[in-house]
Amino acid sequence: MNRKVIYYGFILLIIASYLAFIKYEEYEQNKIIVSAIKKTTISVANIIEYELNESNLTYADYFKKLESRIDDINIMLVQVESVALISDKEINKLTLEYLESSQNLIRTLLLYYKSQFDYGLANDKLENAKRELMANNLFLLSGRLKNAVTEAELELKSVEERYNAGKPRVVSAANRLEINRDKLILYTSSHNLISEVNLKELKGLFFEPM
């Protein structure tokens, strides 16, 4: 057999093997990206379901659930970033944006409910201070109790401002996720992404007309 034929055959075999390896790597990377998208979507959908339906969860339990979902998406972000150098740059970029905006929506909900919880505590503190002031007529105590009421009022005002700002921030975060969803849908099935209906329903819960 001609040595040149053997040589070129060997070169072609190397090229074919390399192309097959690249194809396999792309397949594996695509699996990582699609899996991250699906898992993140499930996390967001799960939280929206809790928002739309009555739940017996305590604040502490819901905080843990939200924080757990944030941590889960962190893992997905790391996985997608790990294939950033060799996967399709545009798909990778849009996937990261989708994951980040999903995580931001959950984080915004967490901050909202923490401010709601703090508002309740601050309101109770003010009511207790007022009751204590009304129950005491001692001159020596009245100044201290009035100061306690004033401090409680200032604390409530500060917490109330954070609480009132929470709903528009949730709507804004949901809008950002919807924008990134619409970009990514060009590259993946809509079944892998959060439902537009779910996002609309969530925004309806938190939207406050001017």
Image (tube, rainbow, N blue to C red):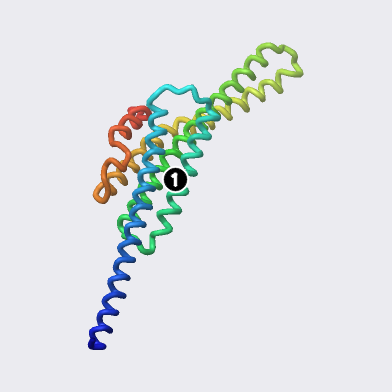
**Residue type at tag 1:** Ile
In the image, residue 52 sits, relative to residue 199, either above or below, namely above
Q: Quadrant of the N terminus?
A: bottom left
Residue under the image location 65 percent in, 12 percent down: 134
Residue under the image location 62 percent in, 17 percent down: 130
Q: Position of residue 89 (x, y in %)?
A: 32, 60
Q: Quadrant of residue 40?
A: top left
Residue lying at the far front of the rendered structure: 1
Q: Position of residue 95 (x, y in %)?
A: 35, 51
**Tag 1 residue:** 73
Viewer-side residue, 152 vs 174: 174
Left or right for 190, reference 139: left
Q: Position of residue 150 (x, y in %)?
A: 62, 25
In the image, residue 204 sits, relative to residue 79, either above or below, namely above
In the image, residue 181 sits, relative to residue 13, either above or below, namely above
In the image, residue 184 sits, relative to residue 170, either above or below, namely below
Viewer-side residue, 133 vs 32: 32
Q: Position of residue 80 (x, y in %)?
A: 40, 54
Residue under the image location 48 percent in, 36 percent down: 66
Left or right for 68, reference 125: left
Left or right for 43, reference 153: left
